[in-house]
Image: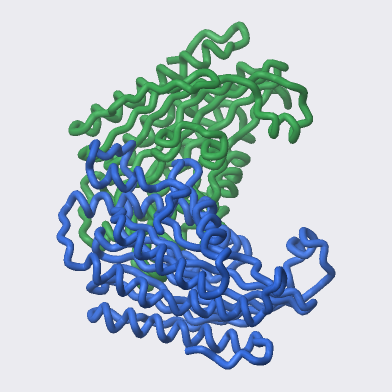
Chain colours: A green, B blue
Amino acid sequence: MSINTQSTVTKEVITEWFKQLQDHISSSLEMRDGKSSFEEDLWTRPEGGGGRTRIIQKGAILEKGGVNFSAVHGEMPEKILQALKLPKANFYATGVSIVLHPQSPMLPIIHMNVRYFEMSNGIFWFGGGIDLTPHYVFEKDAQFFHRHLKQVCDQHHPDYYPKFKQWADDYFYIKHRQETRGVGGIFFDRLADKDGFSKNDRWAFVQSVGEAFVPIYMQMIENNIDKTYGEQEENWQKLRRGRYVEFNLVYDKGTKFGLDTNGRIESILMSLPPEVNWQYNVQPEADSSEAFTQKMLKKGIDWV
Amino acid sequence: MSINTQSTVTKEVITEWFKQLQDHISSSLEMRDGKSSFEEDLWTRPEGGGGRTRIIQKGAILEKGGVNFSAVHGEMPEKILQALKLPKANFYATGVSIVLHPQSPMLPIIHMNVRYFEMSNGIFWFGGGIDLTPHYVFEKDAQFFHRHLKQVCDQHHPDYYPKFKQWADDYFYIKHRQETRGVGGIFFDRLADKDGFSKNDRWAFVQSVGEAFVPIYMQMIENNIDKTYGEQEENWQKLRRGRYVEFNLVYDKGTKFGLDTNGRIESILMSLPPEVNWQYNVQPEADSSEAFTQKMLKKGIDWV
């Protein structure tokens, strides 16, 4: 899937590559799931651009998942221009966003986003990340996940993994619970052509992140799909999904931005899980795997 | 339950009355439910004060409900003082907060809050309200509810109902869904001794609101408890509960304040429902009772 990048990459090339990434990921997941398939909604935005929302529901493996592409453009909101002290400008933003909620509580929730943003004044940046939210933390999976991400990062720069890993720890934090959302991953934003990086360098990194998604989640499925579970695990899954909702509705900047700017609600809120529960003051039993999971939901764990 | 109020009511009297209101409401609900009972958690706040959280779960009628009392005090947060341009001051805040999530989708969710706030500089106010969130809107119930509230308000001032009804319409609004949370009710805040009202006048009104809760919800149970329902109604209930979560986590000022100020999380989030679902892009069938409900979730309906 790599593209010749001898000349500086353009928004058209990036957009086309993101579309292909969406195709690749949704077809790989569909094939692996084997039962359900993605339904696609094409939408347009009155102010310019649109997207392809793809949702799978009630699969054998995926209870609910979204693999979304969008490419929108228009005038920069007045508010943001003022905050950045910039004159009138147009923007172009494109990206792929994924959230998967598996049926089995033994499989982790996963989230990936890769995005590109540019303004008519020449300013541009890339952003994104991948992070994992296991209902039950298994050290082996968290280690595999972080080692894989470190490899992806190290191909591009030795500072990337430590920096973006910490960024994810800080970003995916549910302050009112004093818990991280999951075992983290990598998160990055505003990667521009500075600090010795060219635009093509940044783009090559973002492509590597996008390409890492399928092998990572396939391995998570492989590791955990045969694990048995019962009512207790399903109940715990519903509670953990509640935390996912709390993070996304209270803290997630992408969600907040989408809700504030009249984005396509059903595409933004596709990240919210099916079958969630809030029970009062649940405390896992000492030494249970639920208690272990809760203990692992903190910043700064070195999984590599 | 009325108290002699010839002299101006004090925070001690208000606090004691709120505690008795909590007792009265929780025991009435427990008796009516007949199956489950409230568990009580007493908590204290390091900075001063505390509360009595009472939660009922898995009742015959109430799937999850909280009837909470709190009375907290301390120094006013620096941030708020700056915003209000006030010098250092202490505050005292007490109130009763209720959210009930019934088992049956044919019964409405109800929320009530009555609260009193004062500062050491002499500033004080009352706030609160009652609002109803039916999973299925029944005109008869919404009319009864609003007429009852109008009566309560009219005993105190003819302007109260229209003003506080509109305030509730505006407050309980899920902007990103372009829906009201439910059929509204009354909402009021910062009722102080001005515009010809004494502190005792305001207090008498707040007491009337508190006392209205039990008769109102008993009538809702009476009207709807024998209605049958099946899987379709249960699914719809889970989706409507999702909207309740969206409102509380994205817009509700009380929740936001609690999360921001390190309040007791399990008491704040007791408002979140059990067994919730988010499905992608659900559109009710034309002319269904689900479609009717959605049509009724708008501002400005005159239910009286």
In depth, the one of A48 and A111 nearer the eye is: A48
In depth, the one of B150 and A229 nearer the eye is: B150
User: Residue extending furthest right?
Assistant: B87
Q: Locate residue B89 relative to residue A48 in the image: left or right.
A: right
Percent position of residue B5, x then y: 61, 90
x 32%, y 34%: residue: A218
x 70%, y 74%: residue: B193
x 60%, y 89%: residue: B13
Percent position of residue A116, x then y: 57, 24
Percent position of residue A208, x then y: 49, 25
Percent position of residue B228, x then y: 15, 60
In depth, the one of A272 and A230 nearer the eye is: A272
On the image, which quarter does residue A156 sit in? top right
* A8 vs A56: above or below: above
x 31%, y 48%: residue: B293
* Number of marks: 0
On the image, which quarter does residue B137 sit in? bottom left
| Residue B176 seen in this snapshot | yes
* B223 vs A298: above or below: below
Q: Locate residue B156 relative to residue B197 in the image: left or right.
A: left
* B10 vs B162: above or below: below
Q: Locate residue B142 relative to residue A16 in the image: left or right.
A: left
In depth, the one of A132 and A255 nearer the eye is: A255
| Residue A244 seen in this snapshot | no
On the image, which quarter does residue B159 sit in? bottom right
* B152 vs A51: above or below: below
Q: Locate residue A122 relative to residue A252 in the image: left or right.
A: right
| Quarter placement of the N terminus of chain A | top left
